[in-house]
Image (tube, rainbow, N blue to C red):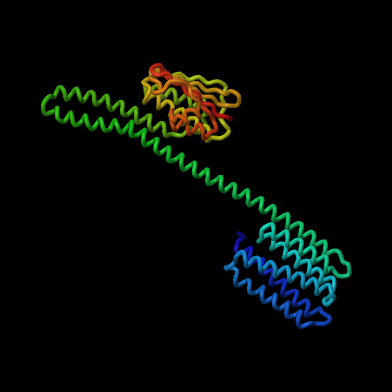
Amino acid sequence: MVPYRGRLALRIARVLLALACLAWYVRAADERFPSVIAVLAAYLVYAFGTLFELRFDSARRAGVALVADVTFFGFWSWVVAVGWVGWPAAGWMSALLCTYVLTSAAILHDPTRVVVTAVVVALLALLFAPHGDAPPVWVAIAASGVAVSVVFHKRYLDRRLSHTLRHNVIIRSQAQGAREAERQRIAADFHDGPLQSFISFQMRLEIIKKLLARDVDAAAEELRELQQLCKTQVGELRSFVRSMRPAENGVSLPASLSRMVDQFQRDTGITSTFSSGELFDPAETEVSLELLQIVRETMNNIQKHSGATRMALSVGVHDHRIEIKAEDNGAGFPFSGSFNLDELELLRMGPVSIKRRVRMLGGDLQLESRPGHGASIEIRIPV
């Protein structure tokens, strides 16, 4: 849709051209015909009228305006051709009218109308060229070519813009889905971790309250166990908060992963090792953040569900892909075997959030489960 000011400018230009044609005919015509003056005056009145109906534009009104402009151009070209106004100035007035008609058509109308208008205008200019004079004809042909080129380029840009808008809608939808999934994951992690500790803490306090009235020694033992529970709860809260942190600015991906593994070992007591081959930071920061979050979730799953005593993380680059492998000696998954990302999604198995993040990055993963003997997950992300 052309902005209001652009449409207003085109209509003001129509008024000025209509006024100029009428004034030129009245001033320069050797013999003034009332019928010609009436047509010129009628078009001027119509041009003024369109100024006041600008806010009521429609496709039908635009089509009527285009027919009126082309008809007036043909009429003026005929007036010039029969020699009723002076030449060559009147001929260049025809060239201005031709340029206006094709410009407004290219701006306001679809390619089909523009092509038809360009052909009609070129034929009228050729038919009514006085004295075999070529410049107005060449102006009409050149303006027709430019108008057709502009309208097809405009359609190309409209399609690009439409594609971009659809892509943006999809991206926003995916981002909204990712935010919702992340909120659900955080809520589930909080419910399964810190919240359960708080509930247990509250229950133990009720037990101690009852024991204090009957058995002080038992109450003291419960307090010691409660202290241990508090230490565990603090560790869980620290891990939970740490998993929400983004990557540190200015720290490379290998260094961030190494720090995460060290912190994981300190918080959980699980013996952890980290090895890094030739690894570089991805060009897009979002990829690094997603990789770090994938590793956080992997280690969080090991801590919560595996019962492992050892964990090993290795990263490297192979065939233009970042490869991350995490392995533990815990209980493994409820299923047995080796599965890739497509198979896991088809069977609805494996860590949902990790699968979603890997898919979003255009990567793949291989998950191997050995119930009672541990599990390993290998993630490959193209760079």
Of residues 55 and 239, the one drawn nearer to the viewer in this rendering: 55
Relative horizontal placement of residue 184, taking residue 247 as reference (left or right): left
Relative horizontal placement of residue 354, taking residue 106 as reference (left or right): left
| 61 vs 188: above or below | below
Relative horizontal placement of residue 172, taking residue 302 as reference (left or right): right
For the point 67% across and 68% down, which residue is it?
A: 65
The quadrant where residue 203 appears = top left
| 312 vs 153: above or below | above
Residue 271 can be seen in this image: no
For the point 31% across and 28% down, which residue is it?
A: 233
User: Which residue ends up furthest to the right in the rendered image?
Assistant: 131
For the point 72% across and 71% down, which residue is it?
A: 17
Q: Position of residue 184 (x, y in %)?
A: 39, 38
The quadrant where residue 132 appears = bottom right
For the point 48% across and 20% down, which residue is it?
A: 274
Of residues 274 and 196, the one drawn nearer to the viewer in this rendering: 196
Q: Position of residue 237 (x, y in %)?
A: 34, 31
Relative horizontal placement of residue 371, taking residue 24 as reference (left or right): left
